[in-house]
Image: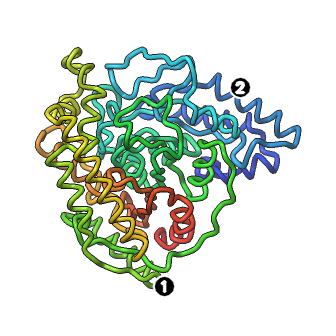
Amino acid sequence: MENWQEASAADLGRAVAAGLDPRELVERFLDAIADHPDQALIYARVTPERARAEAATAHERQRSGVLAGPLDGVPISWKDNVDTEGVATEAGSRLLAGRVPNADAPALTRATEAGLVCLGKTHLSELAFSGLGFNPMMATPPNAADRRRVPGGSSSGAAVSVAKGLAAAGIGSDTGGSVRIPAAWNGLVGLKTTVGAISCEGIVPLSVSFDTPGPLTRTVEDAALLFDAMRGVTTALPEAGLPARLLLPETHVMDDLDPAVAEAFGVAISALSAAGVTITRAEVPELAESAALLSERGGVLGTEVWDQWGPTIEANPEMMYHQIEARFRGNAGFTAEDAAYSRGEQARLARALCARIEEHGMLVMPTSPTLPPLIARLLADDAYYTAVNLLALRNTRQGNLLGLSSLTLPTAAPMVGVMLMAPPGGEPDLIRAGRAMEGILAS
């Protein structure tokens, strides 16, 4: 198969079904990883023994004529906060150095049962708590479009492994944008799944109310197939279909756009309009209220991240990059009363926003307001790091705080994505729309 490093996971699955030996395919990927100069910046650990054993099992199924699914024999990467039996899972943090789980996470187990081959574990932001993907304590993968820039986080290595052809797809997790930002900044599709749709058991937690596993892929079809695989289900792939209407918020999400983002997003909206999609521009006050709640009361997210990691951080000073530690410590003052109040308010805002989406269509917006920042500037300017990290996360995290499902699609402009948001359980609608939109946005 020619151009196998650029092929979609689904196309590789079809090639296996047509006779491509999965053992040959996995060796190609393992060789590509071994030969890549940035291997150690992308992969925290490669698992060649496991990959070869799983490819051999896939080959036996291939010979029997009974494949486990449409992605049987396809090699993918896993973010290093997903437990893998007998292999260190450290979540990008020295706080978890040497942590070796004794079982796979259920999401990985189900994907393996669907025939997917685990190539290894990819680097991430420390404890998954940054949208930038900058991790000087462990490793920072190079942005696929411009290595002077950060790759986006926290699923940084997951994105770069796919963009560089070192995995057919990557699995990440998203608590505030950690699948969608690196997907957008590396020219990929990223699916933020509904909380609870895929088990988070065996995934190192950041905020249990918001953590969601999700795929980073070349195509929407791939994202749909991986969503099914991690759930252990097989569903019919939704047919492509442009949405009749989309709602473009004039509240919050369009402020302070980088000029390149504004230009690319404008081109995308014009192309969708020309294709027959009605774009309604309107104020969406729930977004501003949700942002204010997070800032003033910490939201549920703020209290959970400190409850989860505060004692460990306090007991191990100076083991984290100071910017990540400061962000954790910024949540130390929020109380259980803050969390209870925020939970009620976020539920109210979510109900109102879902009703608005039902009336006017899914939300559409730039995935991130900014291009990925330059690493040199982040190192030189602490205030800039703090500001740009929060700006990068501003749009995506609304989907988490308000319990939505979400999809980012690449555009023709490097490092710029267009994001859709739908109510919880809206993955089929997102996939249907995304399959129709991806060609329009990429041209």
- According to the picture, the residue beneath numbered tag 1 turns out to be 276
Q: Choose top left, top right, bottom left or bottom right for residue 320.
A: top left
Number of numbered discs: 2
Q: What residue is at 41 percent from the left and 56 percent from the top?
A: 404
- According to the picture, the residue beneath numbered tag 2 turns out to be 53
Do callouts 2 and 1 mark residues in contact (Cβ within 8 Å)?
no
Q: Secondary structure at mark 2?
A: helix
Q: Is residue 305 above or below residue 234?
A: above
Give amino acid for label 2: Ala
**Where does the image place residue 310, in percent across and percent down from the top left?**
24, 25
Q: Foreground residue, 130 or 311? A: 311
Q: Foreground residue, 104 or 161? A: 104
Q: Is residue 168 left or right of residue 355?
A: right
Q: Is residue 184 above or below residue 328?
A: below
Q: What residue is at 47 percent from the left and 53 percent from the top?
A: 190
Specify few, some or many for label 1: CA neighbours under 10 Å numbering under 14, 14-19, or 20 or more.
few
Q: Secondary structure at mark 1?
A: loop
**Where does the image place residue 114, in percent across and percent down from the top left?**
69, 40
Q: Is residue 39 visible?
A: no
Q: Choose top left, top right, bottom left or bottom right for residue 29.
A: top right
Of the numbered discs 2 and 1, the one sitting upstream in the chain is 2
Q: Foreground residue, 54 or 146? A: 54
Identify the residue at the far right of this view.
Answer: 64
Specify few, some or many for label 2: CA neighbours under 10 Å numbering under 14, 14-19, or 20 or more.
some
Q: What residue is at 74 percent from the left and 52 percent from the top?
A: 14
**Where does the image place residue 188, in percent across and percent down from the top left?**
47, 54
**Where does the image place residue 361, in percent across and percent down from the top left?**
43, 74
Give amino acid for label 1: Gly
Q: Is residue 248 above or below residue 227?
A: below
Q: What residue is at 38 percent from the left and 80 percent from the top?
A: 279
